[in-house]
Amino acid sequence: MRLNKKTSYLIITLFAVLTVFFGYQASKIEVSDDIKTYVPKNDPEKLIYDDVSEKFGLNTLILAGVSFDDVSKHMNLIDKVTEELKNTEGVDNVISVVNAPRINATDDGDISVGNLKSSFNFSNYDVKKMKEILLNDSMLKGKFVSSDGKASLIIIGLKNNADTRLAAKNIRKIFDNNKLNYHLLGTPTADIEIENLVKKNIEKLVPIVTLLVAFVLFLSFRTLTGVILPIMSVLLADIWTVGVMVLFNVMFNTTTAAVPIAIVGIGTAYAIHVINKYYEEAQKGISKADAVNETLKHVGGAVVLSALTTIAGFLSLLTADLRPVWQLGIFTSTGIAISLLSATLLVPAILMIIQPSPKNNSNEEGESKWLRKTTEFLVHNRVLSFSIVGVIIFIMILFIPNIKTDVQMENYLNPNTEFVQSSNFLRDNFGGNDYLFLDFKAKGKNTFRDFYFNRSIRDFENYAKTFDIATQSTSVGDVVAKLTEGFTGVEYIPGSNDALEQNYMLIEGSEGIDKVLKADENESISQIMVNTKSFSKVKESELKIKDFINSQIIKSYKIEDFDTNNDEHLKAYNHEIRQFIESRRGTYNEKVLNDFVNIKNMSDEELLKSTDNKTLFNMFNTYLKINELDEIDYQTFENVYNKKSSNEDLNEYFEYFVMDNVDQMRAKLAIKKLEKDNLKLNSKYLIELAQYVNDTQVPVIGGDRKIVFNITGIPVIANKVNDMIFDNQMKSMILAYILVFVLFILQMKSVTLGLFSLIPITLTIIANFGFMGITGIALNAATVTIASITIGAGIDYTIHYITRFKKEYKLSSNKFESAVKTSATAGRAIIINSLAVVLGFMAFGFSSIGILKDFGILTAVAMIIAPILTLTIFPMAMTMLSDKVLGKLTKKSILNKKAKENA
């Protein structure tokens, strides 16, 4: 069907109406960049994270770091802000220094699990005493108050169904209204900031890329039509594509924000081909209307194939599991398809209406002298030329192993952004800016209360804290140990379920404890604050923690009363001792077991004899003082000790003293033994381990009590994304090769040429990876797409070259002259097209988002290398082929045959 003015007006009207419709939709586009949404919903790591997050209210956390001159002076203000935050719509829970769980001890000696708010009246309190508590209470210091007492951390958890952006805005208002110097870090606040950044980048980059492409178009065509029509076609494609994204409820993220700019950079090529051919036909002296129809007749197939190969490259990204990657593939492909539609329908329709006149010499026939000379050198010095290319590629290969993956958003944002500044503030004051969660699921009635379950939590969080990336931790194991310290003076978890039952009677129901313990679920977590500046370090630590715990933990056990004559009990006891030592990076010594068993088997009399008299004397006087009795002198003590005293009351008190302090004496004797065993543990750990000598129960392997361990958190999800990037890279690249190869064979009807066509693309990809290794540009959700884009877009140069070579070879049957003339003529168009694409992607260099900047640089580099290698490799390769193989170029492609049959 021939195009005429009536049809053209109809096409223009239809495009205008659709543009208004999609433009309205596009105006509603939003931005969200939550790394949790990157991985598939059914991914095992994602399922674990979702499960733990839902149970413990960790789905959406906002960390608020607040600066003060002295936190202890502003407890009333912190309490006020905490209460206001609790009452904010969308907020589920708030934990701050005022309501965080801690051990309360009264002057009367009463011990309970509470918080500062239950112990103090913040309207009138002793600031000096408060400061002493804040800087010495290990359950608060470093966790909710910085070590210098000048910063406080407030952890805000949002409800599952909350409008997170509205909640984040309201939270910010509370801090602003209270005139606080604060830093907010979390997905909701980051989303708002990134949305502003992305929109500003698109508003800035689209005009820049448009101007750069317009500049190239002007140099190429020197006409207003040649500049405006290609730009109009891709801007229209941008509007339609973003509108489609909104209709499918897809938001921009830092990766898909590249879509509009990529469409402008790539999509102009199709309109360029059409306009170039129109000018060429118009110069032949035929009417402008005939020139339009001749253009559609001769260029349509080539433009469609060019677009299909590019679309194939982007659609290969559908093999990716990462959401932003396959979204980039789908919507850039959509934009390219719309650009193609616009170039083959709208542009010809406008040309039919305005019928512009061409400038002289606007076709491809004019030869480039320097391209001719360069190509002549290449085809007559193939060995040297191939050697130079080979050496360069070999050097690039050497740098490929240097490529790293990095999805840490902080590393791609300007240092002045709130996200980066908040991360640095939390890192400087609290040692980290995110959390790992060690999840312990217990099976068996009230297993969460047994001593081995609680010791395991404490042991393994201590192991986690031996890594540089981890700082402070919070768990129910800590609460149990601190509660025991309140009763005994030593921070540890007793080896008796009866003792644990007493502790848990005080623990359960305390405010904030539900953030680490779900009694009804028989499950508990340890929150480990980590520094996520380097996800690779987090991953390394995560794997070691996981391996250590899985190798150490007794996954199935039963609790039995300890019998030192039972080999199974001794084995279980030894396992606990070893687990304690190695979890704190100490050196295990089997002598510890023998020493502890010997001490356990000592009678009270033997314990007394093994304890220094001076130590016993001081302990007994302390005991008398606690019982409000007068202290005695050393001689009186010796008489009592040697049973020579006639004071019956004193003798009776000494008997009670021995009964009440026999465990302490065992522990003191154990400490003396441990100090000689070279365990490489600090004194605090030695004192804690010494308490194990008083264990009355052991966890025997095999039984109905079970522990299932998992490690999760945003850093774990981020590392999952890192792992997926390499896998996605390979899958999408292989599919892109296959799709482009098949399309190329269909067009050229030659497997040999199909294979040849992949050579410059493959070398381009290798060179690009080498460039990444040299420059340190990391693989991320955006740069992982470069190989597929290179295959899809870079093959256009090959198609253009071979199509022209085919024409020249038909005319001359001289492969050397055909190769030279093809490079001298088509090479000019290839370079112009490449320049338009390169400048289009170089616009990303103006982006304030590093991930987009890297994406633009790498794509631009690829689009520089691809045409250079095409104009280098193909002239040499074509002159190496036999005339028989080259003869196949004269055959019509399957695609062309089918098009003719359908006409």
Image (cartoon, grey):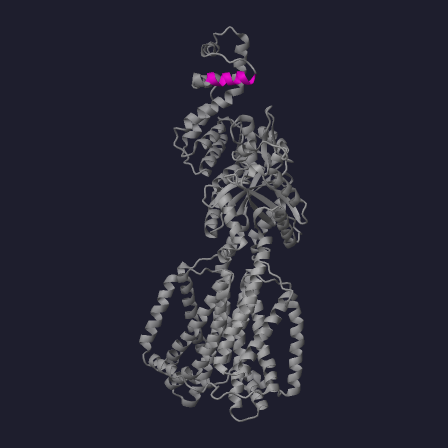
Image-based side of 503 in relation to 87, left or right = left
Q: Residue furthest top?
A: 646
Quarter the C terminus occupies: bottom right
- Main SS of residues in magenta: helix
- Quadrant location of residue 697? top right
Q: Is residue 639 above or below residue 10?
A: above
- Quadrant location of residue 809? bottom left
Instruction: Tell me if residue 903 can be seen.
Output: no
**Which residue: 44% across, 31% down?**
683
Q: Is residue 511 above or below residue 321?
A: above
Instruction: Tell me if residue 354 can be seen.
Output: yes
Q: Nearer the viewer, residue 697 or 587?
A: 587
Q: Is residue 425 above or below residue 578?
A: below
Q: Is residue 40 above or below residue 298?
A: above
Q: What span is colored magenta in the figure?
A: 616-627
Magenta segment: does it hold 389? no
Residue 711 horizontal/vertical position (percent): 53, 46
Residue 447 horizontal/vertical position (percent): 59, 36
Magenta segment: does it hold 622? yes
Q: Nearer the viewer, residue 398 or 194?
A: 194
Residue 824 horizontal/vertical position (percent): 41, 83
